Amino acid sequence: MIPLYAYRDDTCDPRKCTVKKLARRGLLRIATSIAKIPRQTLLLDPTAEQAVSPADQNLPSITALDCSWEVLDTGAVASWRNRRALPFLVAANPVNFGRPFRLTSVEALAATLYIIGEKEQAHDILAPFGWGLRFLEVNADPLEDYSQAKDSAEVVALQALYM
């Protein structure tokens, strides 16, 4: 099982926060400061130039940035070596259902786990949410294709088929 982390800055509604629910269940650890995030982690950052791919499977952990993108200081993470963006996927959460690139943190973490070959862990972290497993159903084809790619460039090429 890959350790999961989230940087959380308390800018979102705590009642709807998927990260807090995962933390309460012991499935994730929350960092309240960027300095507390493990430096070798695979950092999910939508501004990253590389996409998540199966080539990232040997990284020791995965970290989501669970915060408002309007207030995040992207300079604080720009120098991190293992920053990755997610390829095209569609949200299944009730707030953004059917909208591309509007994933909750749990959806982003689950997608990453699935792509790097940790499909069972992806299922496990989505299970506590009534809509969670629907994410895997809605994105079954692209997730499976991305998980068969060899690297980031191939994932980016595959995403063009779904956009």
Image (cartoon, grey):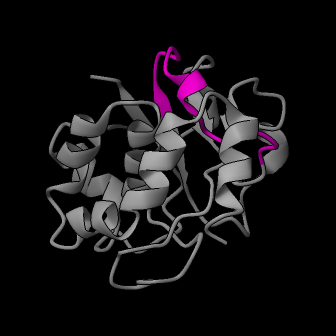
Please name the residue shown 22% across and 73% down the image: 131
> From the image, which quarter does the C terminus lie in?
bottom right
* Position in image of residue 152 (x %, y %): 70, 36
Rendered view: 108 above or below 62: below
Please name the residue shown 50% across and 36% down the image: 148
Please name the residue shown 40% across and 38% down the image: 113
Q: Nearer the viewer, residue 10 or 95?
A: 95
User: Is residue 148 on the magenta stretch?
Assistant: no
| Prevalent SS, magenta region | loop
The image shows a total of numbered marks equal to 0
* Position in image of residue 41 (x %, y %): 56, 24
> From the image, which quarter does the N terminus lie in?
top left
Q: Is residue 31 visible?
A: no
* Position in image of residue 140 (x %, y %): 36, 59
| 123 displayed left or right of 108 | left
* Position in image of residue 40 (x %, y %): 60, 16
Rendered view: 17 above or below 77: below
| 62 displayed left or right of 137 | right
| 15 displayed left or right of 90 | left
Q: Nearer the viewer, residue 156 or 26?
A: 156
Which range of residues does the magenta coloring cover? 48-62
Please name the residue shown 28% across and 73% down the image: 15
Q: Is residue 147 visible?
A: yes
Q: Quadrant of residue 36?
A: top right
User: Is residue 54 on the magenta stretch?
Assistant: yes
